[in-house]
Image (cartoon, rainbow, N blue to C red):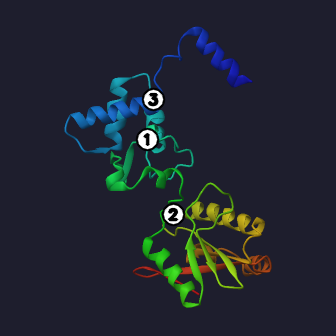
Amino acid sequence: MRVRYWLIYLDFQGNSTNRKPNWLLLKETVIELLETGKTVFTRSEIVEYARKKDPSRSSASIDYEIDLVTVNSNSKDRYRDPDKLFLYRIDRGRYQLYNPEMHGAIEEYIYHRTPNIPHELVEQVINAFKEKGYEVKINKSIDKPLTPNLVAKTSSDKIGVWIIDPSLPVAEQFKKLAYAIGSGILDRTCTKHVVIVSQTVYNKILTSTREQLAKLNIELKSLKEEKKYTLRI
C-alpha cells in the first residue's frame, strides 16, 4: 500500500510520470556513443555520459542499471524484455552493443540458463559420465525450478548434476550450493543428485554433513585446480 500511495503522490505532483526510466536513458546514451564512432564503452564512460544527459540521476542508480540491460550479466534482476537488453559485456567493465549475430540469439539469454562455467569443465563432466555408460543431456531451460545443469541417464538410473562455477567468489559458490542441495532434496524426478564444487568449498563442508547428504541421495564431488579444473570422480 505504501508503494501505491507514493506513486499516486508523485503523479499528483507531476514529478515522475514523464521521466524516462533508467534503461531508456542508458539506451539513448549508448546510441549517442555509437554515433561518436565508439564501439566499445567502459562502465565509467556510460555512467558519465548518461549523467551529462540527465544530471538528476545518481551515478549509483545508473551503474546498477547497466547490469540489468546487459544480456550476459549475472544479475538476478536482469530484464527479460528484449527492448531493454542492448549491452553485451566483453570484459570486466567493458561493453559493446549487443549483436545477436555475434553474441547469440536473444532467446538464449532470456529463456535459457547461461552459467559462466568454463566450457572445458562442462565437457569434462559430460565425458566423465559418458565413460561410465550414461547418456548426458544439458538442461538449458530456466523456466522450471529445481533444474540441474545436466541430467545423466541409464536405463535404470537418472542423476541430476549441478556444477557450481569455481570461478565465482566463495560466498556465491555456497549460495548456489545451498540452492542445488535444496533443489536436490525436493526433486523427485531423479534417483540421485551430484553437486560438483571447488576443492575450497568441498574442504569447508564437514565429513558428517557430506554423509548426511549422501543419505538424501545427494553426493558432493570436488574439483582440483591445476592448469585446468579436474573432476574427482
- Closer to the observer: label 1 or label 3? 1
Distance of mark 1 from mark 3, alpha carbons?
13 Å
Q: Is residue 90 left or right of residue 2?
A: left
Upstream in sequence: badge 1 or badge 2: 1
Q: Amino acid at mark 2?
A: Leu
Q: Are marks 1 and 3 in contact (CB under 8 Å)?
A: no
Tell me if mark 1 has few (under 14), some (14-19) or many (20+) residues whose alpha carbon lies within 10 angstroms of its own: many
Determine whether the residue tagged by mark 1 lies in a helix, strand or loop: helix
Residue drawn at the location 48% of the way across and 52% of the way down: 107
Q: Which residue matches tag 1?
A: 66
Upstream in sequence: badge 3 or badge 2: 3
* Residue 224 visible in the displayed image: no
The percent coordinates of residue 27 (x first, y second) are 38, 34
Q: Is residue 179 left or right of residue 224?
A: right
Tell me if mark 3 has few (under 14), some (14-19) or many (20+) residues whose alpha carbon lies within 10 angstroms of its own: few
Tell me if mark 2 has few (under 14), some (14-19) or many (20+) residues whose alpha carbon lies within 10 angstroms of its own: some
| Picture layout, residue 39 above or below residue 122 | above
Q: Which residue matches tag 2?
A: 168
In this view, the residue in front, 206 or 76, is: 76
Residue drawn at the location 32% of the way across and 31% of the way down: 49
Residue 58: give its label.
Answer: 3
